[in-house]
Image (cartoon, rainbow, N blue to C red):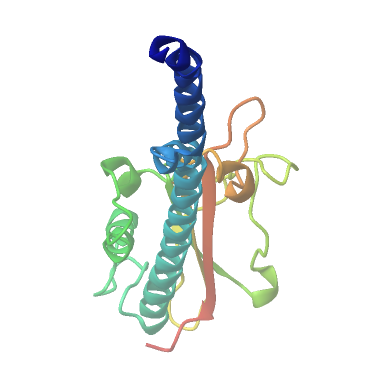
Amino acid sequence: MSSVANGPKSTRLPERNLKRSWRRFSRSTDGAAAIEFAILSVPYFIIIFAILETFVAFAAEQLVTNAVNTLGRQLRTGQISGTLGHPNYKTEAQFRQLFCDEISIIIKCSSAELTSKNSKLIIDARSFASFGQVPTSIPRTSSDAFADIDTGSMKYAPGGPESINVLRAYYRWQVITDLVRPYITNIRPNGSMPTDFLIVATTTFKSEKY
């Protein structure tokens, strides 16, 4: 009698255990956070790197602007002179070294940037007969708004006392994060991937009677 009575219960027990196990498995959240993090971590870190790189690029732009203002003020007051024979005369290489010293917190100048105007760092220091002759646009190699810089007219030739001068500095800041490149790069050679954010800083002044 007992074996017959227990028969149906014994056959239903594995089925009930299986259902209970499946319910527990379906309600389990073990490892859910790890899976969600794995899915979201890639776009999250891309956005973080994009924010950091944009911040550093704009910080470098401010640093270049401060360097232009500092050295422009020294040219205006005669602390630096481009006139041969002046006690404070600086050659182009010496002037570029002074500029590199001003931006060395973030930007490190290579040996090429200390000697060549076609490197990442481009400096243009010239005098003009009037303020109306001072260029107001960025010289490009073509009419394309994203063309490279045309350095043909640039030189280091600041004027003496009471002369009208412009000091312009350009720096090709390389953008590494792919997400940021399409939005902040402003030098985009045809047929190649844009990589450079062009930093531009300008100051125009009339030198004092030093």
Percent coordinates x, y for residue 172 in the rendering: 48, 47
- Look at the picture and state if 70 lies above or below 38: below
Looking at the picture, how far across and down is residue 55, in whole percent?
46, 60
Residue, far right: 143
The quarter holding residue 85 reads bottom left
Residue furthest front as drawn: 1
Q: Quadrant for the N terminus, please.
A: top left
Relative side of 183 to 166, left or right? right
Check the picture and name the quadrant holding the C terminus.
bottom left
**Which sits in the foreground, 113 or 54?**
54
Q: Which residue is at a point 32% across and 45% down the rendered structure image?
A: 115
Image position of 159 with respect to 193: above or below: below
At 43% from the left and 64% from the top, the residue drawn is 59
Position of residue 39 relative to residue 70, above or below, is above
- Residue 17 image offset from top left, x and y in percent: 44, 24
Front in this rendered view, residue 70 or 106? 106
Q: Residue furthest bottom?
A: 209
Give the residue at x 36% y 68%.
83
